[in-house]
Amino acid sequence: ARPDPLRKEKTRKALMDSLVELGLATALWDCLSKQRLFFLSESFSEVNSGEGALKLLCALIDGSQDCFLSLIDFISQAAAREKYMKLVPPFQQIFGVLEPPLAYAALRPGLPPFARGASKADAKASLVSTPEEVELHKQLLGVAQQCLTRSTEEDGLSMDFYVTFWRLSLQDIFVPTDGYEKVLSRMMNSQRQFEDTKARMERNRNFDNHSRDYKTLQRNIVRQKEVYDKVKEEHLQQKLNFEKVLARLELEKSGWFLKKDQEATQALVAEMFMPRALTSYADAMFCCKFVRLLIRMKTPGFLFLDFFNCWTLLLCMNLRGCTEREAQICGIILREMMSYVFSLRQSEKTYEQEMKDNPCFHRHHYDETQLE
């Protein structure tokens, strides 16, 4: 039997209230962040430098990171955005105790929606930044400049692009329409089965309308309809959010690549793609979908062939020193990226549609004067 969504929500709320009232959320946050720093410290390495210690260290780091990400995921689902931001430390403290990829992962659920553009459903939406967003962007730029050894602009990528990449979530750039349709179809079939069962029970002359089975069936029908409506509404909201995010990205894409050369691509892979992809399975999927989005938007300065050469080279280098969990993530990245290449190779029609008037499929970098 599937878990009752209402009971699950009540349990989540009770646990969240306990964490907040007893101050455990802040304590867990502090404990897990310091634990990770301890595992990566020189003192811990000296004590645990014997045979087999490296495998133990990798297991401890993976376990600590899984716990930390699970804590973030639970609090972000159980608390509203404003409440979430009250439970996490200030920007400077977050980036002071965590590596940038984990710090951004912890901060992302509490940030205001990135979507700020017109869409098919809301063509009159404002594209102007709000004062809150301007201030937030300044803060994100400030911590980004502190974390980087050198500005990405020296390598040909704008800092705005860097902040945008780390700020976006998987839900912002990808709508799993197939998954939603399968779930809704399955729920609809279940609803029909309930209705058929109810009709059969009502046709029985000896059936008592107040029997326990009949009441349970009626509750299941109502509950199933509520869940169906919620999932459908969630799908529509996510599609609307994606359209708005895409509209904003289309406006900003021309300023992302300050230099159209291999150095900018290498910076994209080394400072953005690989660090975030190795953070979690969701981040790995985000990075793969983000690359597809760059191609879809025909982003000037981004060459898919150049990018593919850079990330495969860095992937091979990372495999020599990654943990078991990171190795599994590398497998996911490879599968997702190669599946796109395979789809292009398998269908000439798909390839022609993708590359038509798309500078991302150029073999070499060109500036505007060379193209003219």
Image (cartoon, helix red, strand yellow):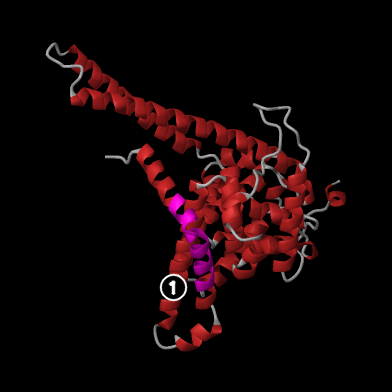
Residue sitting at x 15%, y 16%: 207
- 143 sits to left or right of 290: right
Q: 251 or 37: which is nearer to us?
A: 37
| Residue 348 placement (x, y as % from top left) | 57, 41
In this rendering, the count of numbered labels is 1
Residue sitting at x 54%, y 55%: 283
Q: 294 or 136: which is nearer to us?
A: 136
Q: Residues within 10 Å of mark 1 (few under 14, many from 20)?
A: some
Is residue 205 within the magenta segment? no
Which residues are drawn in magenta? 17-35
Q: Quadrant of the N terminus?
A: top left
- 63 sits to left or right of 105: left
The kind of residue on which mark 1 rests is Leu
The residue labelled by disc 1 is: 60
Please, is residue 330 above or below residue 47 in the view? above
| Residue 246 placement (x, y as % from top left) | 67, 40
Q: 203 or 314: which is nearer to us?
A: 203
Please, is residue 319 above or below residue 1 in the view? below
Residue sitting at x 24%, y 16%: 199
| Residue 275 placement (x, y as % from top left) | 60, 64
Q: Is residue 301 visible?
A: no
| Residue 264 placement (x, y as % from top left) | 74, 61
Please, is residue 235 above or below residue 103 in the view? above
Dividing the picture into quarters, in which one does residue 149 lie?
Answer: bottom right
Main SS class of the magenta portion in the image: helix
Q: 184 or 128: which is nearer to us?
A: 128
Residue sitting at x 44%, y 80%: 54
SS under mark 1: helix
Is residue 25 within the magenta segment? yes
